[in-house]
Image (spheres, rainbow, N blue to C red):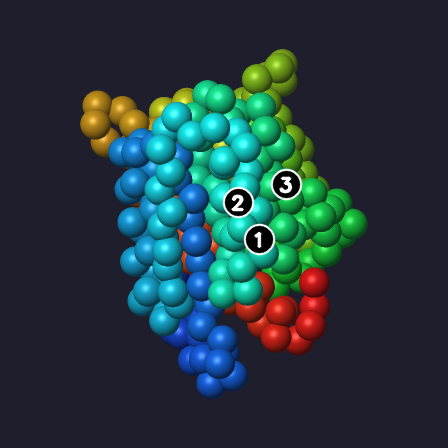
Amino acid sequence: MTAKILSAAPVVEKFKLTQAQRCQALKGKGLTPSMCVVLVGDNPASQSYIRNKRRVCEEVGASFRLDQLPANIGRDEFLTHVERLNQDPGIHGIIVQLPVSEQLRDLDLPNLVTPAKDIDGFHGANTQNIYAGTRDLSLLLPCTPKGVIHLLNFYGYQLQGTTVAVIGRSLIVGKPLSMLLTNFDATVTLAHSQTKDIREVTRQAKIVIAAVGRARFMDRSYFDRDRRTIVIDVGMNSLNGKLTGDVDFEDVKDVVEAITPVPGGVGPMTVVTLIDNLISAVERTAKGIQ
């Protein structure tokens, strides 16, 4: 068999159509969803991610602003800038683009943006919703986990009672995603660098989500052909100048049922979910919900 390719393209197009309608409805009330990205320095990879955010933002009718700050900016000046955005009623969503400069890295970055404008979904008040058991995807939840759920839903994969292996325990993807999947009644195993035998975990799972951050980390030996595994590859690694996933796509494509491509899979879902969070933030503000 050859794996079904779980492209984000049709999901993204469906989302953008709905998002454009929601934006138009808000504009009718005098509210144009407006995002501000705070970039420290001029990291080329960050610039690329920001261009993607700007493109989708503007395609659906939202407003985009980039505040590029010098790499040597002081802590107090940086904090003052973010707080000014927190207080600005014309800005509905704020992103502090990572990585930041060395002198800023020990700041409590996930909690600098006020929860109501935290469209990355990193603030403790927003991630708390996941740990409280929410299934409400209109909340400001972390974008990649939320995007993965939307992708699985679009392609009709049931989560209730399904065994899922999440490989990687980052605060941005692995941990919140494992909890969100549990909220939808999946049976989740969270594996990581200290797991004794990751292959034993992945070969027993119906859905495997790779979020390790190592190019082509998983080959066909991680999958049981008879299990007909669905593979969600969150990895975005640079290998020989090309964007590469955590899963060796060419090696596994004939032993799994379905797999997301890299690029073209989880990455676009993360961006479109970010825009979804932005619009949701404005809708919640319009209803007086914090």
Residue 197 lies, in percent from the top left, at 59, 17
- Estimate the x, y position of residue 205 in percent, counting from the top left: 59, 36
Query: Circle 3 is placed at which residue position?
Result: 111
Mark 3 and mark 1: Cα distance apart in space = 12 Å
**Foreground of the two, 12 or 160:** 12
Marks 3 and 2 sit apart, C-alpha to C-alpha, by 11 Å
Q: Earlier in the sequence, mark 3 or mark 2?
A: 2
Residue 17 in which image quadrant: bottom left
Classify the position of the N terminus by image quarter: top left
Q: Amino acid at mark 3?
A: Asn
Q: Is residue 98 visible?
A: yes
Mark 1, residue position: 86
103 above or below 228? above
Q: Residue at x 40, y 74 (%)?
A: 20
Identify the residue shown where x is 37% and y is 29%. Answer: 71
Tell me the quarter of the picture where residue 280 sits: bottom right
Q: Is any part of residue 207 visible from this angle?
A: no
The numbered disc on residue 82 is 2
Mark 3 vs mark 1: give the one in front: 1
- On the image, the x and y values in percent for residue 128 come to 73, 46
Residues under labels 1 and 2: Cα distance? Answer: 6 Å
How crowded is the residue under tag 3: few (<14 C-alpha within 10 Å), some, or many (20+)? some
First in sequence: mark 3 vs mark 1: 1
In the rendered image, the quadrant that contains the C terminus is bottom right
Mark 1: give few (<14), some (14-19) or many (20+) Cα within 10 Å: many
> Dot 2: few (<14), some (14–19), or many (≥20) neighbours within 10 Å?
some
Secondary structure beneath dot 2 equals helix
